[in-house]
Amino acid sequence: MPHIHKLIDFTVCAFIVYGDKVLLVDHKKEKMWLPIGGHVELDEDPEEALMREIKEECGLEVQIIGERPAYEAEGVKPLIAPSYLDIHTLSESGSSHRHIGLVYFAKAASDEVTLAAGEHNNIRWFSEAELEDKKFTIRPHVVFYAREALKSARKNRSR
């Protein structure tokens, strides 16, 4: 999706866990391993954007890890808060465009994924040990979030 604003856009991403592995994609444009994700469009809330991106990019059914506030109020939709937030500059040379990233963790019902060949070169499940494998050159912030997602999924399983 094209940028909504010339300076900053909101994006969502999901570090999806199945068993003891986390899903990453080899992104064609960014030329790196990243989680599933993309821009929040003008007619979406962050959860809607997250679920749309997951469907488009890997076809999984997931459950977002987190708690939805338990209240009802007219005109208010409680949302599950992201696990983390960050702001990052795009890797495009000379770009001053930034993204405010809403980082979610999710659990998948299956490990059967579909590659979005238009956007990604590859899609694969990574064990915690593989996240450090030099042949993948996964950036440190992605490794951090992936490890946190694995921890969160383990904690969530024991509940």
Image (cartoon, helix red, strand yellow):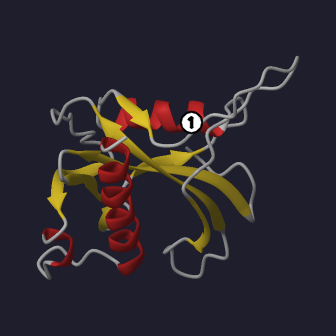
Q: Is residue 20 left or right of residue 153?
A: left
Side of 85 where 20 appears, left or right = left
Q: Indicate the secondary structure of the residue bearing disc 1.
A: helix
Q: Is residue 78 placed above or below 131 in the rendered structure? A: above
Q: Residue at x 37, y 45 (%)?
A: 156
Q: Amino acid at mark 1?
A: Ala
Seen in the picture, residue 104 relative to 50 is either above or below; the reply is below
Which residue sits at x=28%, y=47%?
A: 17
Q: Residue furthest right?
A: 74
Looking at the rendered structure, the number of numbered marks drawn on it comes to: 1
Q: Is residue 79 above or below residue 11?
A: above
Query: In this figure, which residue is indicated by the disc labeled 1?
Result: 49
Q: Nearer the viewer, residue 15 or 90?
A: 15
Q: Tell me if residue 54 can be seen.
A: yes
Query: Residue 78: horizontal and vertical position, in percent?
Result: 72, 31
Q: Residue at x 31, y 44 (%)?
A: 158
- Identify the residue at horizontal 75%, vertical 54% (top origin): 5
Q: Position of residue 101 (x, y in %)?
A: 59, 59
In which quadrant is the C terminus drawn? Answer: top left
The quadrant holding residue 31 is: bottom left
Q: Quadrant of residue 30?
A: bottom left
- Dividing the picture into quadrants, the one containing residue 148 is bottom left
The N terminus, quarter of image: top right
- Residue 28 visible in the current orientation: no
Depth check, front residue: 91 or 78: 78
Q: List x then y, in percent, for residue 49.
A: 56, 36
Lateral position of residue 95 relative to residue 5, left or right: left
